[in-house]
Amino acid sequence: MERASAWLKSAVGLAAVLRDGSEADLPRRLGSCARELLPVDSASVLLVGEGAFDGPGCDGPAFECLRTGRPLAGIDLRQKGPWPEFAARALAEGYVAAAVLPLGRGGEGPVGVLQLLSSDAALSEAGLAGLQPVQELGDLFALLLGHARTLRETRRTVDQLSGALDSRVLIEQAKGMLAERWRVTPTEAFRVLRAHARTHRMKLRDVAASVVDGTLLLEAGVDARSGGRS
């Protein structure tokens, strides 16, 4: 019962990160949860696309876990194994056991892995069943990270569309002001705006904003032979 309560507390804390913090806080929180639930000294989140799996020296169990999408448990670093260089580095830092869990199972593959290191040999004896609570948190982490990334991209798209709409409104407003002032068509007014922007290497939006707020006074006789459609 106590173990289930600890897991539930960790899961709620992980989910609350996006409410109280940011996407960048998720890996730190997952590592903290792993250290609370298992006898580990180090819990590192290695995400795809953030440089953790790039360059030389890609020789440890984390890369094997990412490639296969399967967890690796019971790694006794004191025993001869398939990752001698990784084991040597870990032993030099005082660790004797390791485990690696995929972050997100199924679908298009893991978004990364959770690498666990311990100075306690008990980790190498935990087995997959003993790691299951943290594996489930890893799956939750992947789900939350996916939602956070989708939300971030949606907000970026909304901001871009909002900016484009604001620019269009300013340009239309400037066209209308100039067309009324000069008694010309909106198309002719737009040609003058665009010609000024090109001549002075300005953004069309900035030219329009200056016309609207009165800081830029254009003359109807400005050469607009570059033409164009509104």
Image (tube, rainbow, N blue to C red):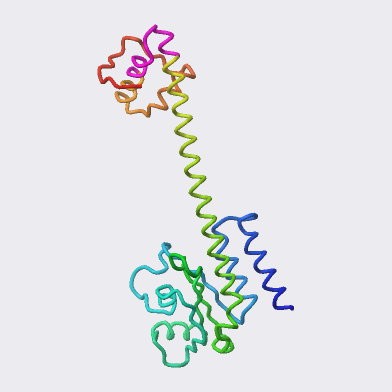
| Magenta span contains residue 166 | no
**On-image quarter of the C terminus:** top left
The residue at 35%/10% (across/down) is 220
Q: Give the range drawn in magenta.
A: 177-192
Q: Position of residue 133 (x, y in %)?
A: 61, 76
Q: Where is residue 43 in the image (x, y as percent from the top left)?
A: 55, 74
- Residue placed farthest to the left in the image? 225
Vertical position of residue 126 compared to residue 177: above or below: below
Magenta: predominant secondary structure element? helix
**On-image quarter of the N terminus:** bottom right
Q: Is residue 89 left or right of residue 116?
A: left
Q: Position of residue 197 (x, y in %)?
A: 34, 24
| Magenta span contains residue 186 | yes
- Where on the picture, by quarter, is residue 204? top left
The residue at 56%/89% (across/down) is 125
Q: Position of residue 153 (x, y in %)?
A: 48, 49
